Amino acid sequence: MERYRYQDKRVSRRLRWSRFLPAVILLAAIVIELTWLEVNTFPLLAVVPVIAAPMLSLAWTAASGAASCAAGAVLALRGTEFQLTRAVLIQLVTLAVLTLVAMFLNRLFTREREQLRTTRQVAEAVQRALLPSMPDRVRGLAIATRYRAAEKEALIGGDLYALHDTPYGIRVLIGDVRGKGTQSVTLVNTVLSSFHAAARHLPDLSDVVRSVEQQVKELRDYRADLTDEDFVTAVFAEVIPEHSVLRMANRGHPAPLLVHEGRVTALEPESPSLPLGLGDLDGSEVPVGQYKWPAGATLVMFTDGIIEARDRSGVFFDPVPSLTGPLPPDPGAVLDAMLTALFRHTGELEDDAAALAITLLPGSDSES
């Protein structure tokens, strides 16, 4: 499983520049004091160690406070012709106390950051354990995946994908569980395990969907913490490379895109279906569409965290423009183009985002 780091790089770049803020404020206070003698720069000096506390290490927080105290002492004594008055002493004591408070806050911030980092690492480990690793190539198909969890609250995401090479074709699943946390983990595990069993043993794709649907319903009946609002949107696909045919069942999920020779085609289902877990409201029929898949074309499947990402104006991200134009028949390059445009559009993800791309290699046959 490959994770995208564009957002992390942007955040780290912003944090790197923000580390200079205490020094900038200190320098500004000194310049203002030397330029306009009547201006009191004590508030600026007082804020230097406080700003440094959440951004810098303990040593640099202490250094920022010491520099602020030294600058305050020199500037204050300069104004009194280097006589230690009661007012100057109060200012210096105040700066020293603020530095000590900032150092205490720095230790609290550091401890909380370490706890959050540990929580996120555990969540990542569980996510990697849940999502199976994908092969790079299977029977004339090149495969690539990308996954990016929204880590603001360090919750385990509900996006899932899987691929199995079966006697009936290469079967693929991508889905999105509503919600996060323990319920999400339970549903993800149920969907993946039931798909693993059904995809390998059931000859018809619609039967595979029904089997997974049944497992989701039984889980909801068994677990008191799961309700009718806990469901899974998903796309089930079946690929026969030697026939260039793609069969697909869409259960309330964003339509996959077929990218070929600069064109992008949305593979919309002929008739909509409800998500997994709500199928009993829609009857037992499972519509399965069939689509032509030319050699060199790339199938792009993704979760709604991508198309529901917004920019600052609230405009949703449209993946089609980023996939229109000259792109190599390489699933990794196709996903990189889409996700680069995604992070350029939104800058920060509010929801998990998973993507899976499969390219039917030119001249491929049924051999691996």
Image (cartoon, rainbow, N blue to C red):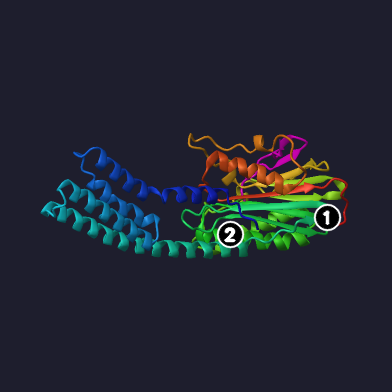
The amino acid type, in three-letter code, at marker 1 is Arg
The amino acid type, in three-letter code, at marker 2 is Leu
Residue appearing at x 64%, y 56% in the figure: 2
- Percent from the top left, x then y, of residue 338? 65, 42
Quarter containing the C terminus? bottom right
- Toward the viewer: 223 or 8? 8
Q: Is residue 320 above or below residue 142?
A: above
Q: Nearer the viewer, mark 1 or mark 2?
A: 1
- Percent from the top left, x then y, of residue 79? 17, 46
Q: Which one is earlier in the sequence, the residue at label 1 or at label 2?
A: 1
Residue 287 in view here: no
Say whether residue 195 is left or right of residue 343.
right
Q: Which mark is residue 139?
A: 1
Q: Which mark is residue 187?
A: 2
Q: How many marks?
A: 2
Q: Is residue 328 above or below residue 130?
A: above
The majority secondary structure of the magenta stretch comes to loop
| Category of crowding for the residue at label 1, using alpha-carbon neighbours closer than 10 angstroms: few (below 14), some (14–19), many (at least 20) | some
Say whether residue 209 is left or right of residue 94.
right
Say whether residue 12 is left or right of residue 298.
left
Q: Is label 1 in a helix, a strand or a loop?
A: loop
The magenta stretch is 252-276
- Percent from the top left, x then y, of residue 346? 53, 41
Magenta stretch holds residue 7: no
Quarter location, residue 40 = top left
- The CA span between labels 1 and 2 is 30 Å
- Toward the viewer: 14 or 28? 28
- Toward the viewer: 164 or 346? 346
Quarter containing the N terminus? bottom right
